[in-house]
Amino acid sequence: MRAYELRRKYIEFFKAHGHKEIPSAPVVPENDPTVLFTTAGMHPLVPYLLGEPHPQGKRLTDYQKCIRTGDIDDVGDNSHLTFFEMLGNWSLGDYFKNESIHMSYEFLSKELGFDMNRISVTVFAGEEGIPRDDEAARIWEEAGIPRERIYYCSREHNWWGPAGETGPCGPDTEIFFDTGKEKCGPNCDPTCSCGKYLEIWNNVFMQYNKQKDGSLIPLEHPNVDTGLGLERVIGLLEGKKSVYETELFSDIIAKIEELSTEPNEVSCRIIADHIRTSIFMIIDGVRPSNVEQGYILRRLLRRAIRHMRKIGFDPSNMPTLLETFITTLEEMYPETRANKDTVVAVIEEEKNKFLKTLENGEKEFAKNVQRAKNEGKTKLDGEAVFHLYDTFGFPPEMTAELAKENNFEIDMDGFQELFKKHQELSRAGAEQKFKGGLADHSEKTTAYHTATHLLHKALQIVLGEHATQKGSNLTAERLRFDFAHPQKVTPEELQKVEDLVNEQIQRDLVVTCEEMTLEEAKASGATGLFENKYGDKVKVYTIGDFSKEICGGPHVERTGNMGHFKIKKEEAVSSGVRRIKAILE
């Protein structure tokens, strides 16, 4: 079965069970400062999981483009990817465990033809104050999974959420495929990492609302949130040992090997994954930089380029390789072809910058060697090796090769010790970034969200209709708004924009919301951003007689209490895109 066919089969199955299809959101979340990228299909649905009515109803299904960067250093093995597609279905206060489990069983057995004798499931084992999930276990047994393949597991394995300190949470049930490997020991079960069991689907049952004091209150309308990994399932259906052997990667890796003089499996996989992920980041507006999403993009591209050098891939062949990527991706993601020129231009520019950095790194290496020689040493210490890695992007293998040419060795143990500390700090930083959970819907961020609508309209009035939104990021302290404009905004123009926004705040305009079809929204004059992400029905927020936009919320009820709008900075983000940072005082 092809990946595109699997996706359509999934969507059509759930549509036949009363679900409405909604489009994939961008890989960069809108108005959610707590995560760098969309890591699961539920991210764009958080307001609706919290109780806000969805325009498409209570049963939803989609495919979601996701990016997860916590395991970048593991990419190259059989299963790790930084970009992947998550197939999902949701019940927003409609059906619950019984329907969810039976639909999952039916899809795997009847639609995909899985040997259900190779399927095992896990359910929540319970803990003090929370009963074990005997209900889910009973339903699985009724569906056809025998008791000996139903495992009770702890919170670590079978509990989801809340995303932050408070909010919806609950037990989940995970579905695993038996790969056929021998058990690693008598206690081997689906929670084991030996490779015998491969997780393919997760059904989350959000049935509690966690309070600040840690207590759990049953939700009046529990939700179901599921996620099935397309790449993993395609690998199983094709009988492949690795996702990189599937149709999603086979042509790409073959082209990398063709254009290389000394290809190896790990490097080819890293290049394939990292360039693939970079393409989707660039399409959704990310550009290489030293902060946040831009830093991740730069890291991926530079790691891919290092591995290209390692396997003798001539960097001048990058456009040829990118054409192969586009050809492979365009059936499932037509936007890749439409944005090909931008993708090529961004990657070529970053490639040229990094090649210059590599030259500087080689000079730094020579200095380190000379310094060591002057001290009578024949080995580069771990600190020097790590500095070349961290600052100049030199993998220790490259440093070792250069050292050998100079009759030197490198202190790999010292490097590994520093690298391990670096990973621990990086992971701690990531945990800090993500610990706040998903979008903050506090009073302040709601005001900032509304302010982006006022700012967007004011920019179009002052600069012209071309000044359309290219992205935004909100916290409780400020807003950041990216928009299309070919040149620096003058101080006089910025003052006009600021005055316009404050005028609307002072007018105490009423903010109203209407649900309508996308065509009706367009006919009404509503501004639509990222139109390919909208479903058949949308929410249109109108701010007095000033602004009308398609949006998911949240918004204030009136503008009068938002505070005084103050622009703090205006700067370039990339060619043709400017950024404004502003606060509400």
Image (cartoon, rainbow, N blue to C red):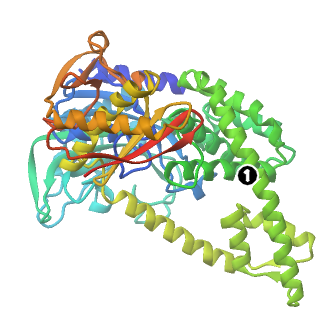
Q: Position of residue 33 (x, y in %)?
A: 36, 50
Q: Is residue 205 left or right of residue 191?
A: left
Q: Image point 34% across, 46% down: which residue?
A: 32
The percent position of residue 490, horizontal first and vertical second, equals 48, 38
Q: Position of residue 371 (x, y in %)?
A: 84, 82
Q: Residues within 10 Å of mark 1 (few under 14, many from 20)?
A: some
The residue identified by callout 1 is: 354
Residue farthest to the front, as pictured = 492
User: What amino acid type should be assigned to the residue bearing mark 1?
Assistant: Phe
Residue 521 occupies which quadrant of the picture? top left
Residue 549 drawn above or below residue 162: above
* Nearer the observer, 377 or 76: 377
Secondary structure at badge 1 equals helix
Residue name at image x 80 percent, y 53 percent? 310
Q: Locate residue 313, reporting x and y percent.
A: 82, 44
| Residue 455 appears in view | yes
Say whether residue 411 is left or right of residue 223.
Answer: right
Whether residue 19 sits left or right of residue 557 in the image: it is: right
Image point (22%, 33%), residue name: 504
